[in-house]
Image: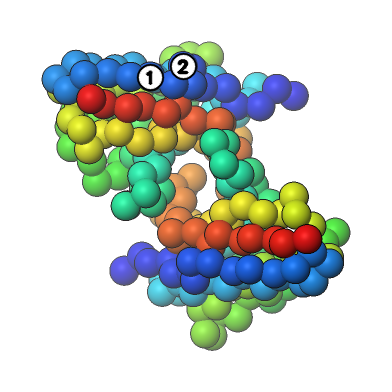
Amino acid sequence: KAGVTQTPRYLIKTRGQQVTLSCSPISGHRSVSWYQQTPGQGLQFLFEYFSETQRNKGNFPGRFSGRQFSNSRSEMNVSTLELGDSALYLCASSPGTLYEQYFGPGTRLTVT
Amino acid sequence: GEDVEQSLFLSVREGDSSVINCTYTDSSSTYLYWYKQEPGAGLQLLTYIFSNMDMKQDQRLTVLLNKKDKHLSLRIADTQTGDSAIYFCAETFPSGYSTLTFGKGTMLLVSP
C-alpha cells in the first residue's frame, strides 16, 4: 500500500497570506489528523477528521481550519499567516477504529 | 493533565543497547507509542503498547511499561548508526480517538 502523501513538501509564504496544504491518507483509512511541529513547542495536535467530520480539535486559533473530502483526502488552511506559523505540518492517517497512526513526510512552511 | 516527558539526548556506541525513557502523567492513557524521526522526514511508527500490557518485543525493540510509576521505556538492542534519530514517546486517551500527545523527543546519537 502507498503511504501517506503530503503536498507540497516545501512552501514559502509572506505574512498575511493564506496557505492550503493537502494530505492523501493510506487507502482505506478514514481518519486524518494534522500536527504542527516546531523546535520550541514540539509536536502539537491541530485537528482530526473522520468521514468528513471534524472529530477533535486542538488548541489553535480559528485561522487554522481543515476539511476532509469523501475520498478521505484532507486539506488544512491557514489564513493571515504569521511568522510563528513557520513549522513542519504533519498529517497522519488511521483506520479510525484502531489506534495506529501513520505519518506523512510533512510540509515545511516558511513564513517571511 | 496531559504531559509526556523525555530526556533530550542519549549517546551510545554501535553494538551497545540503547534505552530511551519516557514518563507520562495521565493514568487514563490507553495506548503508548514510540515514533522515530530522521532529519527532514516525517514520523515512523516503531511500536506501541496497550496500557494493560507490561512488555512488548518486536525484533530489536523492547518496550517496557510500568503503569504504577507511569514510566515507559524503549530498548534498542545492538544499536546501529542507522538508528541515530529523534525518538518520540506519545500517548492517547479513551476519549481522544486518534489524538496523540507527544513528548519533546530524545535525540539518539550512535557513534561507530
Label 2 crowd bin: few (<14), some (14–19), many (20+), radius 10 Å: some
Q: Quadrant location of the N terminus of chain B?
A: bottom left
- Residue to which mark 2 is pinned: A8
- Image point (62%, 61%), residue name: B108
- Residue to which mark 1 is pinned: A11
Asked if the residue at tag 2 contacts the one at tag 1, i.e. Cβ–Cβ closer than 8 Å, the answer is: yes
Asked if residue A110 can be seen in this view, the reply is yes
Q: In this view, does B30 lie above or below A110?
A: below
Left or right placement of residue A92 versus residue B53 in this view = left
The three-letter code of the residue at mark 1 reads: Leu
- As drawn, the label of residue A72 is none
On the image, the x and y values in percent for residue A107 come to 45, 26
Q: Quadrant location of the C terminus of chain B?
A: bottom right
On the image, the x and y values in percent for residue B67 come to 56, 79
Q: Which of A47 and B41 is in front in this view?
A: B41
Q: Which of A83 and A62 is in front in this view?
A: A83
Q: Nearer the viewer, residue B110 or A63?
A: B110
On the image, the x and y values in percent for residue B23 come to 49, 74
Q: Distance from label 1 to label 2 (Cα)? A: 7 Å
Q: Are marks 1 and 2 on the same chain?
A: yes
Subunit under mark 1: A
- Image point (26%, 34%), residue name: A85
- Image point (44%, 21%), residue name: A10
Q: Nearer the viewer, mark 1 or mark 2?
A: 1
The three-letter code of the residue at mark 2 reads: Pro
Say which element carries label 2: loop
Asked if residue B31 can be seen in this view, the reply is no
